[in-house]
Amino acid sequence: MRIAIAGASGRMGQMLIEAVLDTEGVELAVALDRKDSPSLGRDAGALLGRETGVAITDDLDALAQADCLIDFTRPEGTLAHLQACVRHGTRIVIGTTGFDDAGRAAIDVAAQKIAVVFAPNMSVGVNATLKILDLAARILNSGYDVEVFEAHHRNKVDAPSGTALAMGETIASAWDVALPDVATWARHGETGPRESGTIGFSVVRGGDIVGDHTVYFCGPGERIEITHRSSSRATYAQGAVRAAQFLGDKRHGLFDMQAVLGL
């Protein structure tokens, strides 16, 4: 399978390139970056000390040479890449977060023409955690207050994280409610007692934290904590390559990592 990587010179892009190079059955075909990237024209594996024979380019038409693009960039970049994938019939794995409603709608439309995996977190462990949260929320559906805590590095631009939102959506779905109807995004000043049935969110941004997520179910006399901590972006990269392989026989449709993992 011929794989293209977006944001090839960035930290996540380099992790993705390394994962592709280390995975049997896939090959690096295209490495994309911004028009102002100083890495344009360099070998995609230069920063890894590995020769790939693939030069980093800003030419989106290069996607015609790939079976699937893996994209962990920014919403505006991903949406431009998505349209290029539609033009060339290239599948896409989207790990980018922070899309607004219009961006999500554009992904839905594209999935009618090409195969798409769209997930806020490609980690196998995170997706196992989401499955556990669904079960916990169904059992602890009364008498427990729920808080979703997340912490990421200082350069992350969206909050709460896509993974935290996925956790909240999983719990809300188990309760048969819509997350926007029960979410508490911020607290300041005299807030009064907590309203039952709500899901609170707390965010930390600092240092080089890769990603920590904890969901608290707080009841009378007890507290249940379900936690996932990432110590390396490699888990996201490996999951993304697995998602690309999953799309190998798919012509169109929108899938998530639960589908990729058979959960």
Image: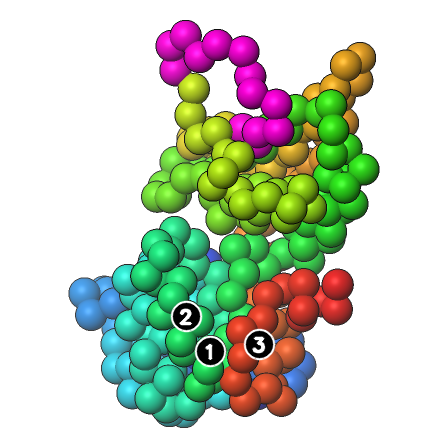
Indicate the secondary structure of the residue bearing disc 2. helix
Q: Which residue is mark 2?
A: 107
Q: Is residue 217 magenta?
A: no
Indicate the secondary structure of the residue bearing disc 1. loop
Sooner in the amino-acid sequence: mark 3 or mark 1 = 1
Please name whichever residue, 146 or 16, is drawn nearer the observer in this view of the structure. Answer: 146
Q: x, y (%) of residue 138?
A: 76, 41
Q: Which residue is mark 3?
A: 244
Name the residue rendered at 67%, 69% in the picture. 259
Circles 2 and 3, Cβ within 8 Å, touching? The answer is no
Q: x, y (%) of residue 102?
A: 32, 61
Name the residue rendered at 41%, 70% in the picture. 107
Please name whichever residue, 117 or 8, is drawn nearer the observer in this view of the structure. Answer: 117
Please name whichever residue, 194 or 232, is drawn nearer the observer in this view of the structure. Answer: 194
Looking at the rendering, which quadrant does residue 14 occupy? Answer: bottom left
Residue 259, above or below 91: above
- Residue at the far left: name it: 36
Residue stretch in magenta = 188-200
Looking at the rendering, which quadrant does residue 214 occupy? Answer: top right
